[in-house]
């Protein structure tokens, strides 16, 4: 699932990490020089103290005592600066307070360690990242991510990485990974809600209507959701609101029988709103928790069919309208999601055939473009091939090292 995208994100990461590493090393070297200077200075000071103390004059002894006090009492003595002074180098000074580090305070090794691990502050300029960010932009576009969403992700990456970075002690690899995780999670988690909680809290029967174009997996998704709900203890009834297509009744009946779920259907050519109405009445009369209403596959431009959908809305006032489309349709799925949402407001989406999609563009784009979340991913033809869409999990998956 989404393998191409994952691979492209991996290439971007290594390029961006290389840039960050180069910058970090450059700053490291400056830090080492600065720390070495300080260390050399301290060495000279201490030598001077030792000299004056061995000279045996009273004043020299006093000086030596106060210097010794200072070096044991003031942990910042190694760089001779006030420990309370906050000039951005406090991380460095915190790093020199341990006994081990004090012991090696005269060595360049100490300086490098303190500077790179504790201070770890460097600046990446926009120009440094131009190459990697251009590469990221292309990678996302070629993975069918919608252009506005690409801008959003690249913009977040720029914000996270360019300029003076936060002081951190993690590796540059982690910094780039964190930025990418933030950028991706920001766009895919738009509008997310806990669908299980929503079902639990809803007044019953809860009516869910499924819309979308032909053949994308609406009916299969209804059967999958039927199972998902049953596993959580909810009773269901299916309703075939696709009175348009010949064979639609047989198709959904097969699923209903396989699932052992009651199906309400009318003759082909009947009024879909009437089918849904009957299903809601059945649910009310029989204490059924959820009505799952199929509808005919349609384009948002099919006026007659869109009117039907609007009538279903008026007659049964669904609690949830779910837009179903296939991940493999990429940008087309994103465009249709936007158009359907404008025509009949949807509450969320189910993205089917994610198992067959290596690009991931629709999965990344739909929430940001519509403001409505992807709630489930269809990941196969079996009834249990339905995954709750979890933005954090998807980001983890996309960023996982092989
Ligand atoms: N690989 C894979 N195939 C799926 C998935 N979901 C549905 N399918 C397959 O897609 C095909 C079409 O699914 P349907 O459920 O009939 O699609 P539909 O949208 O109801 O189609 P119409 O009723 O013609 O509008 C079937 O062969 C399903 O098995 C999925 O998540 N992964």
Image: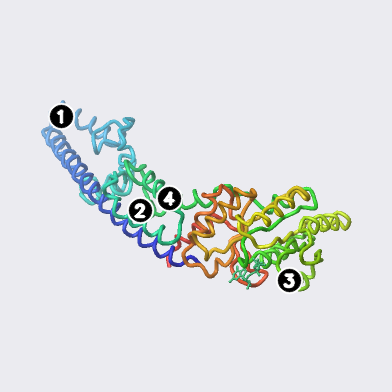
Out of 321 and 354, give the one closest to the viewer: 321
Task: Give the Cα distance between marks 2 and 1.
Answer: 47 Å
Q: Which residue sits at x=15%, y=37%?
A: 50
Callout count:
4
Task: Give the Cα distance between marks 3 and 1.
Answer: 96 Å
Give the mark nearer the N terminus: 3 vs 2.
Answer: 2
Give the mark nearer the N terminus: 3 vs 1.
Answer: 1
Q: What x and y, as percent, mark residue 86?
A: 33, 32
Answer whether residue 388 is visible to the viewer in this image: no
Q: Does residue 393 appear left or right of residue 219 in this picture?
A: left
The residue where tag 2 is placed is: 171
Q: What x and y, as percent, mark residue 187?
A: 50, 50
**Ligand 1 position by quadrant:** bottom right
The residue where tag 1 is placed is: 60
**Disc number for residue 153:** 4
Which tag is nearer the camera, tag 3 or tag 2?
A: 3
């Amino acid at each position: 699932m989404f393998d191409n995208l994952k691979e492209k994100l991996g290439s971007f990461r290594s390029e961006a990490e290389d840039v960050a590493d180069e910058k970090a090393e450059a700053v490291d070297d400056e830090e080492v020089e600065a720390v070495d200077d300080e260390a050399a200075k301290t060495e000279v000071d201490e030598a001077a103290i030792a000299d004056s103390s061995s000279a045996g004059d009273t004043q020299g002894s006093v000086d030596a005592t106060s210097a010794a006090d200072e070096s044991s009492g003031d942990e910042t003595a190694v760089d001779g600066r006030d420990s309370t002074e906050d000039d951005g180098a406090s991380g460095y000074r915190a790093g020199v307070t341990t006994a081990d580090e004090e012991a090696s305070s005269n060595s360049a090794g100490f300086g490098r360690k303190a500077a790179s691990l504790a201070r770890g502050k460097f600046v990446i300029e926009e120009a440094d990242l131009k190459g990697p960010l251009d590469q990221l932009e292309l990678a996302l576009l070629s993975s069918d991510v919608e252009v506005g969403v690409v801008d959003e992700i690249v913009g977040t990456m720029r914000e996270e990485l360019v300029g003076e970075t936060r002081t951190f002690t993690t590796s540059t690899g982690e910094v780039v990974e964190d930025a990418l995780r933030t950028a991706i999670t920001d766009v895919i988690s738009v509008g997310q809600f806990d669908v299980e909680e929503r079902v639990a809290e809803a007044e019953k029967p809860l009516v869910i209507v499924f819309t979308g174009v032909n053949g994308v997996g609406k009916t299969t998704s209804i059967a999958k959701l039927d199972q998902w709900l049953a596993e959580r203890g909810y009773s269901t009834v299916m309703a075939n609101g696709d009175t348009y297509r010949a064979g639609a009744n047989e198709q959904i009946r097969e699923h209903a029988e396989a699932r052992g779920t009651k199906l309400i259907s009318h003759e082909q050519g009947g009024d879909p709103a009437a089918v849904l109405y009957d299903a809601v009445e059945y649910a009310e009369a029989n204490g059924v928790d959820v009505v799952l209403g199929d509808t005919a596959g349609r384009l948002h431009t099919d006026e007659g069919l869109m009117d039907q959908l609007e009538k279903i809305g008026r007659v049964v006032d669904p609690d949830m309208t779910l837009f179903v489309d296939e991940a493999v349709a990429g940008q087309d799925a994103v465009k249709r999601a936007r158009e359907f949402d404008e025509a009949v407001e949807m509450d969320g989406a189910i993205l089917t055939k994610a198992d067959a999609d290596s690009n991931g563009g629709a999965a990344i784009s739909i929430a940001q473009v519509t403001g409505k979340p992807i709630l489930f991913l269809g990941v196969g033809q079996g009834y249990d091939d339905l995954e709750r869409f979890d933005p954090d999990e998807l980001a983890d998956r996309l960023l996982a090292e092989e």
